[in-house]
Amino acid sequence: MTPSQKASGNGRPVAALCGGVGGAKLALGLQKVLGGDLTVIVNTGDDFTHLGLRICPDIDTVVYTLSGLSDQERGWGRASESWNFMHALREAGGEDWFQLGDRDLAMHVLRTQALHGQTTLSEFTGTIAERLGIHARLLPMTDDTVATNVLTPEGPLGFQRYFVGQQCRPVVKKIEFLNAADARPSEQAIAALRDPTLEAVIICPSNPYLSIDPILSVPGYREALARTTAPVIAVSPLVGGQAVKGPTTKIMDELGIKISSASIAKHYPFISGLVIDEADRADAADVPVPVHVTPTLMKTLDDRERLAAECLRFADVLRSQRKAS
Amino acid sequence: MTPSQKASGNGRPVAALCGGVGGAKLALGLQKVLGGDLTVIVNTGDDFTHLGLRICPDIDTVVYTLSGLSDQERGWGRASESWNFMHALREAGGEDWFQLGDRDLAMHVLRTQALHGQTTLSEFTGTIAERLGIHARLLPMTDDTVATNVLTPEGPLGFQRYFVGQQCRPVVKKIEFLNAADARPSEQAIAALRDPTLEAVIICPSNPYLSIDPILSVPGYREALARTTAPVIAVSPLVGGQAVKGPTTKIMDELGIKISSASIAKHYPFISGLVIDEADRADAADVPVPVHVTPTLMKTLDDRERLAAECLRFADVLRSQRKAS
């Protein structure tokens, strides 16, 4: 397969649901395998307006990851980033709890300007993705504003205040998705999930409660996932009963959910299969759907591509079994 | 005089009218001499909205100059500036004809956010000036939008399109100040000019047509300058019949104005005296107001302070003569 074949796709459409860092790694692997056949539906519940700028952290993480601009070490933001805007902001007395890199700022400024005009978030994201040479199709879950809100004993916290401002320290009592009931899903995303030629849907190993649930909270997605003809494969974010990064297990604990692969599977009642890490192999028997066990830690680019290919093969297997039965 | 005395002022109020770079140099000299007794009324005709950000080039030049943050070599913007935002903007396909430094951006982002709220440009400018330790009082000429518009044979050009985008190349047929007739002057500025204890008004050596005229186009300023009890001293922007920087003489030529100190004096019918450079000494006889001849090129900080002190002494002399007559 040559790069140009990958870029234009091979008529093997696959959809992925994705949050930020962890999910974006698998999305990159899927893009490597599928090129233009990949549609990534991205969480926008983390989005917020800060300093008058519209910031979409998960979209930007996916954009930077799929375009090769991301900082591999820090895990978020752009490589070769500088922080002189933040220095000057602090000096001028501006709010400095949320880090905005000088290069990253270009995205927020351009997006804010575009959204103030007639451009939708989907259109802006598509234009930027094309400009930065991304082969996959990136779709915000909705063009409406849905805001993830974390209820804590100290009161409600907007997502970034919880996640960045308070470093996930407050106990989570409940997670809400403000305005979700009134939001319209991305038409293109729903169409992709309804496509009868769809080969697989991959739920990336993002935080199920903070990153995937916002997508599922928008009317249309659960139904489309329940009805899609393609196998829906979730990749568990747990490795040896721990989250690789982020507050997944802390939140499971606080919400009274048992930390296990079975809990992840039950959280996604529409899935056909679950991919779990070798370290969680003992969990497999309790998982109510078919399981594929493999190393899921994605350190290298090869890890990402290999895991992506395994997810797609697992989907192939499940589809053949379905046809055979 | 100790710095703290200068900061709090000595009850010797002085007002200055000022554009960008050249004017800001004299404003800095005046601040050195006067501290908190100085009120600087700044041109906002150059202001524009770019990439959704409200940019006030002359206010920022004055702020950076008076706070010691300016780039002395480049002549505009901030020292130790970096340009990674611009790199990323270009990469993402954004408009890149107007340079925005990473540090400078903090000002535009904060101001845009403030103006979208209930804050006026005067309030924002005052807050920033205080935060950055500026002793002088900085006042935008108006809180309303006035836009300098340059009429050229190729059609009308917004100020920044003419000045930065086209590098002042088009021939100037006429200069307009859009919305000036409906704009309200800064109340504090008018009050400063009407203050019976005012010692002097200094018209800084900014471009009379592009930087000072926008201020004078706002109703109230010409009248206040004609009626002020203090001597009004203009510093000619010409040195040896040439502008130190910028298109002053090119514009005079294009508008059919003779390039001479007399033309500068006639342009300001309300002045009590004109300060001209030694190189223009031969012009003195034709100037219809009292003239003070001195080196006006401000290369060093000392030059600025010396010229400022000379302007104030010249005002003193004119005031005494007035009393005596």
Image (tube, coloured by chain):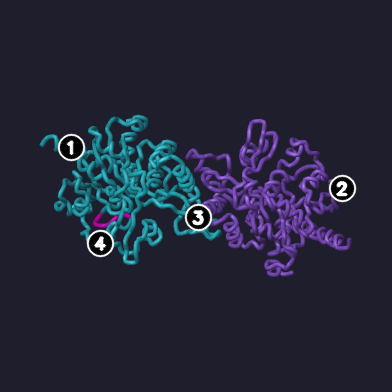
Chain colours: A purple, B cyan
Q: Which mark is residue B140?
A: none
Return the chain for callout 2: A
Same-subunit check for callouts 4 and 3: no
Between B194 and A303, the one nearer to me in the picture: B194
**What residue sits right under mark 1 in the picture?**
B319
Query: What is the three-letter code of the residue carrying label 4?
Result: Asp
Mark 1 Cα shell of 10 Å, populated few (<14), some (14-19), many (≥20): some
Residue under pointer 3? A117
Kind of residue at badge 2: Ala
Is A318 within the magenta? Answer: no
At a point 84% along the width and 46% down the height, the residue shown is A280
Structural distance between the alpha carbons of marks 1 and 2: 95 Å
**Mark 1 chain:** B
At 53% across and 39% down in the image, what residue appears?
A: A95
- What's drawn in magenta, residue-wise? B239-245
Using a 10 Å C-alpha cutoff, classify the residue at mark 3 as few (fewer than 14 neighbours), some (14 to 19) or many (20 or more). few
Residue B116 location in percent, x, y? 46, 44
Q: Are marks 2 and 3 in contact (CB under 8 Å)?
A: no
Q: Secondary structure at mark 1?
A: helix
